[in-house]
Amino acid sequence: MTALAALVARELRRPAAADIVALAAHLREALGGEAVLFYGSALRTDSLDGVLDFYVLHADPAGTRPKWAFLWPRVSYHEHEINGRIVRAKVAAMPLATFEAAARGDTLDTTIWARFAQPARLLIAATPVVEQRVVAAVCDCVRTALRFAAALGPVSGNAEAYWLALFAHTYGAELRVEAQGRGRSILLSDPAYYRDALHQGWQDLGLIGTDPSEPLRPAISEAERRQWQARWQRRARAGKPLNILRLIRAAWTFDGAARYALWKIERHSGIAIALTPWRERHPILAAPGVLYHLWRAGGR
């Protein structure tokens, strides 16, 4: 096992709060799946407030590819009572083989390797083989991220400079608004992990020696830098269109969309809107009425 694999395996196996583990078990029971990953901002606090983020990885599909398969993952929203309180989760589900391909950077999508180069927890794995595959895939996420960091970052600098350059590019390629300084706040949450992951990932890739000292200077030629920058440009151009297509797909396939939207409205505005059966079945058609109700309530 390489130093990077040991670091990733140790990080994935770190314990999470018991209530979060219980929620992961409920999600696996509800959705099936071979593995459940927990990630995102709640991971850094173990807080049950807000919406917790999970990935559920399914067995590799057999036979005909399902419609919209290229627009993975399928997203759903869940509410579950644990120890007398409602805990909320947004869940992305996809085949494990698709997750592995995205982690290697085989696709134009950046979301998998950009997210799982960051710390995550593997809360459930059906078998030791599944666990090994997830660990290997997360190692690929780190290596893919760090290849781009070497090409997109400075010629020389410390580990933080390369991660900040990478986060600036990956957030910029997605259809999302992040507060200024978001990348730095992520790094400050676990600076030792990001430093060690960069050193060990670059050692795996042959970009630095086994005894790194800063400032770092990855061993990448100008030709290789231009090649990886060109690869990045293709991904950057595809990022927002892919996000838009996924939003369109989610409008029709997001399980629990109405429940999630009404909870968000109440959380941010303080205005509670009833979840009727019609609104739950037809979230898109119900949206204008919900917005009108919100406007009327806000104007009083």
Image (cartoon, rainbow, N blue to C red):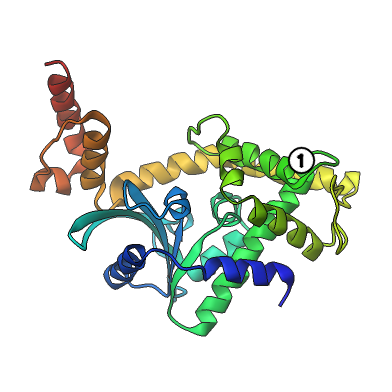
The front one of 249 and 8 is: 8
> How far across and how far down the image is residue 251, in percent?
31, 44
> How far across and how far down the image is residue 128, in percent?
52, 84
Above/below status of 99 relative to 250: below
Above/below status of 129 relative to 94: below
Apparent side of residue 58 relative to residue 193 in the rendered image (left or right): left
Q: Residues within 10 Å of mark 1 (few under 14, many from 20)?
A: many
> How far across and how far down the image is residue 273, in percent?
13, 36
Residue that badge 1 annotates = 153
Pick out the residue farthest to the top.
299
Apparent side of residue 211 relative to residue 42 in the rendered image (left or right): right
At horizontal 52% and vertical 77% (from top left) the residue drawn is: 131
The front one of 96 and 141 is: 141
At horizontal 32% and vertical 53% (from top left) the residue drawn is: 48
* Image quarter (top left, top right, bottom left or bottom right) of the N terminus: bottom right
Apparent side of residue 263 relative to residue 111 in the rendered image (left or right): left
Above/below status of 201 relative to 42: below
Total marks shown come to: 1
Residue 109 in view, yes or no: no
Q: Three-letter amino acid code at disc 1? A: Gly
The front one of 59 and 77 is: 77
SS for tag 1? Answer: loop
* Image quarter (top left, top right, bottom left or bottom right) of the C terminus: top left
> How far across and how far down the image is residue 258, in percent?
21, 44
At horizontal 12% and vertical 43% (from top left) the residue drawn is: 275
Residue 298 in view, yes or no: yes
